[in-house]
Image (cartoon, grey):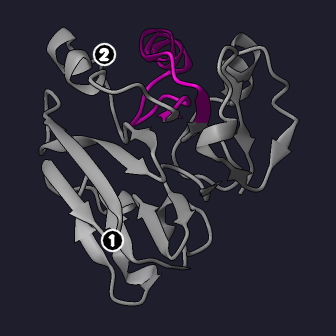
Amino acid sequence: MQISWHGQYTVKIISKEVTLVLDPYSSSVGLPPFRAKGDVVGLSNPSDSTMSQISGIQGNPLIIDTPGEYSVKGLTLYAMGWKPAEGEERNVQRWVIEDMVVLHVGALTRKLEEKELQELERTDIDVLLIPVGGGSGLTAKDALSLVGTLEPRVVIPIHYKLPGLTEQLDDVKVFAEEMGVDAKNTEKKLVLKKSKLPQEDVLTAILTI
């Protein structure tokens, strides 16, 4: 499984013959237009056009944008719906890809309730995709709290300050330092195998676009 981050909440995961795109951003956020081939597109906040721009996805992808349980193209998904104080329903997505559990919380703006955590923790979380820059997503402090609760094996921070962004976000440095890593040590993509996941220490991967 190969994971790359493309800015904001947008993540691409390549698994064998299937490419999954999560929350493709709109160029209105201040980044270059996002273009990618995709077989499946997961939208955690479909009412927000800035993170559900499917026009840049090449091919004829299957779009999943509502809560529920799905099995598509060798992937399985449990999308848990939640509603902010204001606005339309969103969802937290727990994918199973190559026997690894990937949790994408999307534009989560609050702490998860106990019953929600229990639902998500029915399976161990291998990879956590988590916003850390504040704004329309979690702050570094709340992100760190969720990491401590879920205890994933791999953490990939997303949705933080980048040159050109119209949204004012915090730098990834604060989160990285708390996780004990250097924010300058970045990589373009992360390749993971179930058999080689860390068993004790948490791997924090800072991806660059």
Identify the magenta region: 129-156
The percent coordinates of residue 21 (x first, y second) are 45, 65
The percent coordinates of residue 104 (x first, y second) are 40, 41
Tell me if residue 160 is in the magenta stretch. no
Q: Residue furthest front?
A: 195
The percent coordinates of residue 19 (x first, y second) are 49, 71
Q: Residue visible at 51% across and 76% down?
A: 17
Tell me if residue 153 is in the magenta stretch. yes
Point out the frontmost of discs 1 and 2: 1
Within the image, what quadrant is residue 170 found in? top right
Residue 153 against residue 62 in the figure, above or below: above
117 and 196: which one is in front? 196
Residue with the mark numbered 1: 73
Visible in this render: residue 87? yes
Residue 195 against residue 171 in the figure, above or below: below
Within the image, what quadrant is residue 140 found in? top right
Q: Residue visible at 39% across and 37% down?
A: 136
Amino acid, disc 2 = Lys
Distance Cα–Cα, label 1 vs label 2 = 32 Å
Q: Quadrant of the N terminus?
A: bottom right
Amino acid, disc 1 = Lys
Tag 1 near tag 2, CB within 8 Å: no
Q: Quadrant of the C terminus?
A: bottom right
Q: Residue visible at 67% across and 56% down?
A: 164
70 and 148: which one is in front? 70
Residue with the mark numbered 2: 111
